[in-house]
Amino acid sequence: MRHQGSRPARAPRRMPALLMARAPSLLYASAFNRRFEGQSSAIMRAPPALRSPISTERIFGDRAARFRHLTFPRLGARIEQIAPPWFLIGAWVDDEPAGLMMAGPGVTAADMLLKSVSVAPSFRRRGIGRHLLQELETEARARKVSRIAARFVPTMKLAEAFVSLTSHLKWERPRTVSLNLTGEAGLMAQSGGEWPGVKTWLSDPGEFTFEPWRPLTVADEEAMARLRAQSAFRSYLEFTGFAAAIDPACSLHIRRSGALLGWIAATPFQGAMVARYGNRIGRHYRSAYVDESLWRSAALIAGYYHAFSRQGETYGNDSIATYFTDFPGQMALTRRRFASMALSMEEIREVAKTLQPG
Ligand SMILES: CC(C)(COP(=O)(O)OP(=O)(O)OC[C@H]1O[C@@H](n2cnc3c(N)ncnc32)[C@H](O)[C@@H]1OP(=O)(O)O)[C@@H](O)C(=O)NCCC(=O)NCCS
C-alpha cells in the first residue's frame, strides 16, 4: 500500500494500543488510559495528507521489535515472539514505524480477532489506520473467515476515534458484550442478601447447601459432565485449568441433597487493580455456573451472597471482589443490584464486521 502526503514530525516513542481479549480486565483500561494521559479523546479535524510514502508489511522477530511502542505494553514486551496464527502488520513512513496492527483467531473458526491497532500520534488521520484494517479484511478473506471483531473498553481515551474508524469502514455499531464489576466483599454480600429472592434462599434453603470448595468426587465429575453438556455452558467456565489456585475460603459448590448442581470459583487476585484500592486482599470470581433448571431461581445469587460473606469474614469486608459476566440476565442483574455499590463497573464492547463472500 502506498500513498502520498506531507511529511509528518517524528512520532513520540511510547504509544501503546489495545483491543481486549475475551475477558478483559480493568487493568487493561487503566493502564491504557495512563499511557494516554494528557491526550485528548476529542474527535479531531483531519490533518493534511502525507507527502512521504507509506508502506505496510507483515513483520516478525527483530523487525517487529521496532514497533514495540505501538501496542499495549504487555504485548509489546513479547512482540518478537508473536507467531502464526497471530500476525502483525506494520506501517512505515520512510524508515519510521508509523502504525501497527495485530490480529489472530477469534472465538470460533469463523471469526478473526483484531487485538490491537495503533497509529503514532503524529501520523494520525492520514489513512494509516484505515489501511491496516483493510489489510485485516484481506487476510480474513484469505483465511476464509466470515467475521472480524474487536473488543474494547469505552473508557479507553481514543475509543471514539477507533469507533469512528470502524464505522468509516462499514463495521457494525458497537454493542456491550460483557461487564466487569469490582467492589468490596462486605458491601457486595449485603447488596445480594437484601434481594427478596435471595432472602428466601437464606431463610429456607431446603435440601440445598452451599459447601466450601473441595476436590471433586467421581459422582461430582459425572454431574460436571452433565452440566458441561448444557447449551448455556461456555468453555471459559471450565475451572480445571486453575483448580490449584481456587480459594476454598470463598469458593463453593451448590448442591441438592449432596448432588453437585453448580459452583462459584474464586482465585487470589493481585496486581495494579487491587493496588488501586490500597493493596487490600483481592479475589477474582473466575467461574460461576448453576444447572439451567435453577436459572431465574436466584440460586446463583444466593451462592454469591455466601461467597462474598465468607470472603468478608476471612479477609475483611473491605477486601476486593471482582467478577465478569456475559450472560444477558446476569449483566442486567449486575447493573440493577450491584452497580450502585461497586467501586468500578466496566463495560466491554464489541465491534464487528461480517464479510460478504467475494
Ligand atoms: C484509532 C486509530 C488507530 C485511527 O488511526 P488513523 O490512522 O488516525 O485513522 P485514519 O486516518 O485511517 O482514519 C480513517 C477514518 O476514520 C475516522 N477517524 C479516525 N480517527 C478519527 C478521529 N480522531 N476523529 C474522528 N474520526 C476519526 C475518520 O472517518 C477517518 O477518515 P477521514 O480522516 O477521511 O475523516 C488512531 O486514532 C489510534 O492509534 N488511536 C490510539 C490507539 C487506539 O485507540 N486503538 C484502538 C484500540 S486498540
Image: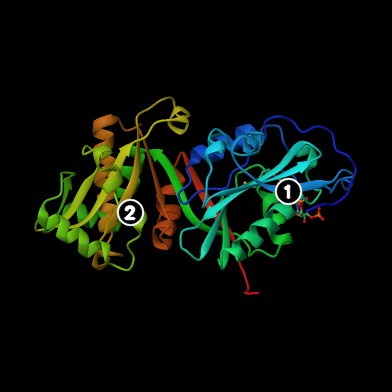
User: Where is residue 225 drawn, in percent x and y?
Assistant: 21, 61
| 143 or 193: nearer the viewer | 143
Residue linked to disc 1: 56
Q: Secondary structure at mark 1?
A: strand
| Circle 2 or circle 1, nearest the eye | 1
What amino acid is labelled 1 in the image?
Thr
User: Where is residue 169 drawn, in percent x and y?
Assistant: 71, 62
Residue for point 11% across, 55% down? 218
Residue 111 lies left or right of residue 268; in this view the side is right
Q: Quadrant of the N terminus?
A: bottom right
Residue for point 17% across, 60% down? 223
| 321 or 193: nearer the viewer | 321
User: Where is residue 314 drawn, in percent x and y?
Assistant: 24, 31
Tell me if residue 147 comes above or below residue 150 in the rendering. below
Residue for point 74% across, 30% down? 12
Q: Quadrant of the C terminus?
A: bottom right
Crowdedness near tag 1: few (<14), some (14–19) or many (≥20) residues, C-alpha within 10 Å: many
What amino acid is labelled 2 in the image?
Leu
Residue 105 lies left or right of residue 307; in this view the side is right
Mark 2 near mark 1, Cβ–Cβ under 8 Å? no
Residue 222 lies left or right of residue 161; in this view the side is left
Residue 353 visible in rendering: no
Q: Secondary structure at mark 2?
A: helix
Residue linked to disc 2: 237
Query: In the rendered picture of this protein, how many numbered marks are placed on residues?
Result: 2
User: Where is residue 210 drawn, in percent x and y?
Assistant: 18, 49
Q: CA distance from mark 2 to mark 1?
A: 39 Å
